[in-house]
Image (spheres, rainbow, N blue to C red):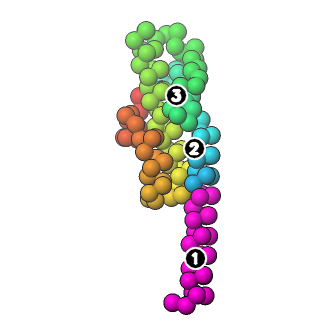
Amino acid sequence: MDAEDARERLEAWQADASRRAADTQAAAAGLSALRVTAADASGAVEVTVDSTGAMADVRLSARVQRLSLEQSQLAIMGAYRNARVKLAEAAAEVVRETVGADSATGRALLAGFRTAGTEDDEVRY
């Protein structure tokens, strides 16, 4: 390999590294901006979670007045779990669009969004 080939390979490597860094920054920005809302199965409760999965808001419909205390608790927890599932789905979409879900960076970014209650997207409360 001559000096010109080495220089071209180095420039290509630098460009690739710069692109990956920009993609990673875009993924991090997109993930930190996530905020999703989901309801329980009956629609009595809506919960909003922020990018960390923490509950940011709870909205109760008038239907809650007809629920028992236990049913209200289940509705809140169901809405919260559904919001966490939606958060994991939204995070996966951000990662797919930026760094790729199959990349090492993508897998590392998504690891924090795979939590109990989000592993099975079919589980809805």
Residue stretch in magenta: 1-23
**Mark sitting earlier along the chain (3/2):** 2
Q: Is residue 52 visible?
A: yes
* Label disc, if present, on residue 31 of the rendered structure: 2
Quickly name the residue at label 3.
Answer: 54
Q: Is residue 7 left or right of residue 39?
A: right
28 lies above or below 7: above
Mark 2 residue type: Leu
Marking on residue 10: 1
**Is residue 17 rendered magenta in the image?**
yes
Q: Is 101 or 105 nearer to us in this picture? A: 105
Q: Please tell me which of labels 3 and 1 falls first in the chain.
A: 1
Tell me which residue sits at (62%, 46%) in the image. Answer: 29
Residue drawn at point x = 44 percent, y = 22 percent: 77
- When the figure is inspected, residue 70 is found, relative to residue 4, above or below; the finding is above
Label 1 is placed on what type of residue?
Leu
Q: Amino acid at mark 3?
A: Ala
The secondary structure that dominates the magenta segment is helix
Mark 2 and mark 3 in contact (Cβ < 8 Å)? no
Q: Any magenta on residue 55?
A: no
**Local SS, label 2:** helix
Q: Residues within 10 Å of mark 3 (few under 14, many from 20)?
A: few
Which SS class for mark 3? loop
